[in-house]
């Protein structure tokens, strides 16, 4: 089982590594968008999938990252890739400040608060907060990223940049999932009271996951700003949060392959449906309902943890 | 797992489109979904009509013209993808699009792919300040419209003016353009704020504006909000004159606000074909009415039509589809040509030159009349 | 002071519509713990159906304006209620036993589908209600100008809310709905057919939403296919503000949200109006995490 999936993943990786050679710039750019949303989906997956926190305002953290990059780059000329840690810091800090007083709220209340924060931030950006966000026009003229003096400009060049970032994300998040931290967070999601009883500080873990997911979205924002070279408040509206959320749930909440597949479907399908012109979103909506009904747990749900016991015959179930 | 492979296969198959060059391909990037879908739908209608007429007359350089439409969704990210997609379809030129920030997201992609882009509704000044070689637009810039609007306001002899925008790139740009110019002329701005578009109740906004006591309200946003503002001002019994920017006009405005409420409403915009004497404008209007049963409702779809005509004329005159030669031709030799919205020429930046804007006012029958 | 009262009436007018839509969110949430994202689009459909029926039957001309509007409202409410039940059947019932967030995504899908269906059927342009249905005059009340249509809308929505309140509080079926909202399993043991209760909720909520759509059409004259999204989000906020799952809470939440918006734009900033509304909501939730009238329920032991 393990070996088989390794072959499949290896095969996919190999196909994707050489894909830009065979694809035209449009499809490469679609894959870039898939990659970007996959990173965003994975970061939200920590919050929604692993910690079970109902976050429908993830675009806000994405926006904080993108605007941090855009402002520091256009005002001080700092190369965008150097700004990655700064974007992570500002987005994480922002998330920490807003999450601190609300993290204890019950599911749906947290949902509306995150929606509200997202909207407040968008309106603040439109109204040119502190005179540095450029109002509705946004910020333009963000410079392209450079790697060892090589300027990344074309879709297939971004493909490898985003691809690398995605690989690193998958690797780190995979390690995180199977760490002590990841298990504790899952425990809190499954049964907060029991987790508290086992000595896990639930709100501490929830807050940590929230900040971590937000910081990661901030870094994705940095890449997005560099790729678009122009960012405007409308790129971070409620709909973007909805897409990220749906990627996680539809793909399979808590599962990395699921979220990746969710990103492929959510970004890819509207493109495949382009030939339906103005009916494409209708078909997309119907597809969402059908997929959810057919696979209620998501397409590739999180597998229950299994542990091989030293001598017993049956493996353990869900923690 | 199979699903991933299947999707990848599908991706590969879909990309393997053949490139046959027996037609001249012209792209249209328009908002077919999203909040400006009505503008996009009409842009598509206009271009389909013009392309069909052109092909009926034998096409260009002995080839048929093929229109390739793509949806920008009124959103920068979708637009960037649509632009990438159009570049892979072998288009010579692209017409569009409507929103300024949406156009901006596509500009570099077309420029790097050496494709002529003729925007039809993107009036933000900075779009043409980047000196992109292949970028043109048939709509005038915000500063052009600002000047005309300031003149119109000065003519009304209003001393205190309220400026209301909707925080969109376009409306805010126009409001910001007009404000200092009015202040310079000694007109007091008693109110300057933005409403939230896409809502139906603006009585709170109107009540607040009324409290500021302006002689005139200048609204720079879009026609649906303009309709609601006019209607609700009338219901509130507030008889202040309104002046609008060019996005406030649409043939639907009378229906939206009611005949009584639009009476006396003035606005500046590029003229619709029916106010133009030229033969091509009259022919176009008749053909459009015949095919779709109504007049074009928005000046921007007609400006998209002008974009198409400009590209077609350039290809026919320069006898080439090479982007460099076409751009050179449009920049230098394309002067004072007859268009659906008056005469058209481009300056070195690709902006349309000449005063396009006219000042209109509604009479009490719901018709608009050109003002001097 | 006059301006203050004028803004207060402005806020109440908008708020009564929010309240009417919020009822649908809160009732569905009460029994299913589901945020019915498609509810906003059912509201849109109510507005469009109202326009179509007005144009095709012209009831106000044949049987008089008053009776005509009542019949029209009943038709719209009935049709939207049926549609609501269909949405429940197709998009939500198959997900009844699955994780809650899956149902949320299905609801989002249904919302996208309905919104685009309206766009494809009616076109993307703004649609307009026929003029002169209700006299466009205003009543001068101590210097406040209040349009007749506004008073009518406020009255109708308050009447609908009162009717619902009495229905929920005083009738047997209403008691069953409340029981199912508190504990489905216990309700089932008491002999309540929970499936029927859910169906009923998906008839009543959309019916009220559809009525709200018709009222918006009559009052503002202008409707478009994305209006459900804007109104829906506000109404959902109102439901949370009042304490989700709580019916009087949704009414109160809607009215308060409308007033906050109007006073916020009057005395703080118009451009920040929506941000102010959300900010107040967050403040209230920090101080009172269950909303204004929400009951404190034990989460999980």
Image (cartoon, rainbow, N blue to C red):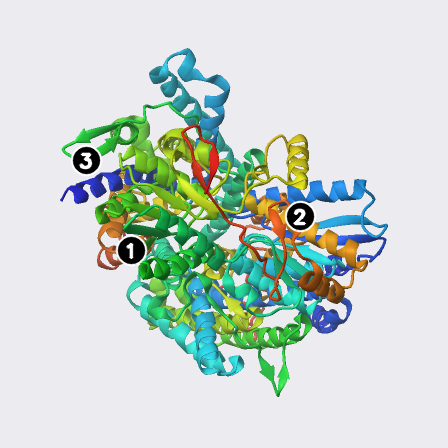
Image mark 3: chain: C
**Crowd tier of the residue under label 3, counting other residues whose Cα lies within 10 Å: few below 14, some 14–19, many 20 or above:** some
Q: CA distance from mark 1 to mark 2?
A: 39 Å
**Disc 2 secondary structure class:** strand
Q: Position of residue B331 (x, y in %)?
A: 67, 63
Q: CA distance from mark 3 to mark 2?
A: 54 Å
Q: Which residue is mark 2?
A: B338
Q: Are marks 3 and 1 in contact (CB under 8 Å)?
A: no
**Of labels 3 and 2, the one closer to you:** 2
**B9 shown above or below C40:** below
Q: Marks 1 and 2: same chain?
A: yes
**Disc 3 secondary structure class:** strand
Q: Are marks 3 and 2 in contact (CB under 8 Å)?
A: no
Dividing the picture into quadrants, the one containing residue C25 is: top left
Q: Position of residue A128 (x, y in %)?
A: 37, 65
Q: Position of residue A280 (x, y in %)?
A: 62, 46
Dividing the picture into quadrants, the one containing residue B81 is: bottom right
Q: Which residue is mark 1?
A: B189
Question: Residue at point 66% right, 33% down?
Answer: B286
Indicate which disc residue C144 carries: 3
Image mark 1: chain: B
**Crowd tier of the residue under label 1, counting other residues whose Cα lies within 10 Å: few below 14, some 14–19, many 20 or above:** some
Q: Is residue A109 left or right of residue B311?
A: left
């Amino acid at each position: 089982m393990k070996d088989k999936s390794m072959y499949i993943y290896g095969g996919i990786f190999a196909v994707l590594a050489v894909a830009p050679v065979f694809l035209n710039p449009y499809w490469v750019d679609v894959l870039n968008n898939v990659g970007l949303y996959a990173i965003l989906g994975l970061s939200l997956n920590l919050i929604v999938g692993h910690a079970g926190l109902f976050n429908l305002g993830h675009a806000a953290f994405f926006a904080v990252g993108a605007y941090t990059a855009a402002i520091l780059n256009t005002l001080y000329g700092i190369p965008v890739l150097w700004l990655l840690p700064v974007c992570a810091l500002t987005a994480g800090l922002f998330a920490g400040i807003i999450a601190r007083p609300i993290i204890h709220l019950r599911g749906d209340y947290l949902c509306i608060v995150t929606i509200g924060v997202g909207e407040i931030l968008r309106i603040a950006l439109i109204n040119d907060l502190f005179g540095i966000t450029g109002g509705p026009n946004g910020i333009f003229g963000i410079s392209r990223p450079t790697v060892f003096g090589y300027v990344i400009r074309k879709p297939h060049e971004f493909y490898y940049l985003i691809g690398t970032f995605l690989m690193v994300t998958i690797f780190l998040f995979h390690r995180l999932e199977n760490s002590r931290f990841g298990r504790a967070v899952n425990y809190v999601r499954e049964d907060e009271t029991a987790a508290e009883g086992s000595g896990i500080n639930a709100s501490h873990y929830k807050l940590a996951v929230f900040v971590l997911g937000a910081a990661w979205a901030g870094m994705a924002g940095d890449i997005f700003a560099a790729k678009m070279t122009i960012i405007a408040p409308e790129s971070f509206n409620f709909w973007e949060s909805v897409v990220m959320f749906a990627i996680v749930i539809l793909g399979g909440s808590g599962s990395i392959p699921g979220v990746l597949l969710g990103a492929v479907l959510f970004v890819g399908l509207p493109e495949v449906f382009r030939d339906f012109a103005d009916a494409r979103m209708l078909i997309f909506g119907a597809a969402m309902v059908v997929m959810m009904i057919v696979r209620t747990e998501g397409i590739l749900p999180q597998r229950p943890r299994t542990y091989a016991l030293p001598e017993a015959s049956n493996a353990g179930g869900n923690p | 797992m199979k699903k991933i492979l299947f999707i990848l296969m599908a991706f590969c198959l879909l990309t393997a489109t053949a490139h046959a060059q027996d037609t001249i391909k012209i792209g249209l990037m328009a908002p077919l979904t999203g909040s400006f879908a009505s503008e996009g739908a009409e842009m598509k209608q206009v271009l389909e009509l013009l392309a069909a007429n052109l092909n009926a007359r034998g096409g260009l350089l002995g080839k048929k013209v093929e229109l390739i439409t793509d949806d920008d969704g009124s959103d920068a990210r979708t637009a960037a993808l649509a632009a990438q997609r159009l570049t892979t379809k072998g288009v010579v030129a692209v017409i569009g699009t409507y929103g300024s920030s949406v156009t901006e997201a596509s500009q570099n992609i077309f420029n790097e792919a050496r494709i002529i882009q003729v925007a039809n509704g993107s009036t933000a000044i900075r779009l043409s300040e980047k000196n992109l070689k292949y970028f043109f637009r048939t709509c005038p810039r915000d500063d052009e419209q600002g000047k005309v609007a300031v003149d119109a306001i000065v003519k009304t002899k209003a001393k205190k003016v309220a400026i209301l925008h909707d925080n969109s790139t376009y409306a805010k740009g126009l409001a910001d353009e007009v404000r200092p110019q009015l202040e310079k002329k000694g007109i007091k701005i008693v109110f300057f704020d933005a409403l939230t578009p896409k809502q139906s109740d603006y009585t709170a906004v109107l009540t607040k504006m009324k409290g500021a006591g302006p002689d005139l309200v200048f609204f720079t946003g879009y026609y649906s909000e303009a309709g609601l503002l006019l209607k609700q001002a009338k219901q509130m019994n507030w008889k202040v004159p309104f002046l609008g920017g060019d996005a406030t006009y649409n043939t639907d405005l009378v229906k939206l606000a009611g005949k009584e409420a639009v009476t006396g409403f003035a606005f500046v915009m590029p003229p619709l074909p029916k106010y133009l004497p030229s033969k091509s404008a009259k022919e176009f209007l008749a053909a459009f009415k015949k095919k779709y049963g109504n007049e074009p409702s928005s000046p921007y779809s007609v400006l998209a039509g002008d974009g198409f005509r400009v590209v077609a004329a350039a290809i026919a005159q320069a006898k080439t589809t090479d982007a460099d030669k076409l751009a050179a031709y449009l920049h230098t030799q394309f002067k004072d040509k007859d268009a659906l919205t008056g005469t058209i020429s481009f300056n070195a930046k690709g902006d349309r030159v000449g005063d396009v804007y006219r000042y209109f006012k509604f009479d009490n029958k719901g018709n608009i009349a050109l003002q001097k | 002071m006059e301006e203050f009262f004028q803004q207060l009436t402005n806020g109440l007018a908008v708020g009564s519509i929010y309240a009417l839509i919020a009822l649908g969110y809160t009732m569905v949430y009460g029994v299913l713990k589901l945020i019915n994202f498609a509810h906003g689009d059912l509201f849109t459909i109510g507005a469009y159906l109202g326009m179509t029926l007005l144009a095709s039957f012209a009831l106000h001309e044949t049987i008089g304006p008053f009776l005509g509007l009542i019949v029209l409202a009943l038709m719209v409410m009935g049709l939207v209620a049926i549609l609501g039940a269909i949405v429940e059947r197709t998009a939500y019932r198959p997900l009844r036993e699955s994780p809650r967030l899956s149902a949320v995504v299905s609801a989002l899908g249904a919302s996208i589908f309905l919104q685009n269906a309206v766009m494809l059927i009616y076109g993307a342009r703004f649609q307009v209600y026929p003029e002169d249905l209700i006299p466009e005059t205003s009543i001068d009340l101590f210097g406040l100008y209040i349009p007749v249509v506004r008073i009518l809308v406020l009255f109708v929505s308050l009447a609908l809310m009162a009717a619902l309140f009495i229905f929920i509080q005083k009738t047997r079926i209403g008691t069953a709905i409340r029981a199912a909202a508190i504990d489905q399993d216990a309700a089932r043991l008491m002999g309540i057919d929970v499936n029927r209760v859910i169906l009923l909720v998906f008839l009543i909520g959309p019916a009220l939403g559809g009525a709200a759509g018709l009222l918006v059409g009559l009052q503002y004259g202008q409707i478009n296919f994305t209006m459900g999204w804007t109104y829906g989000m506000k109404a959902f906020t109102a439901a949370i503000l009042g304490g989700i799952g709580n019916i009087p809470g949704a009414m109160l939440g809607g009215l308060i949200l409308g007033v906050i918006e109007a006073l916020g734009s009057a005395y703080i900033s118009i451009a920040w109006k929506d941000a102010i509304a959300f900010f107040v909501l967050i403040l209230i939730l920090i101080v009172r995490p269950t909303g204004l009238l929400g009951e404190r329920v034990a989460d999980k032991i």
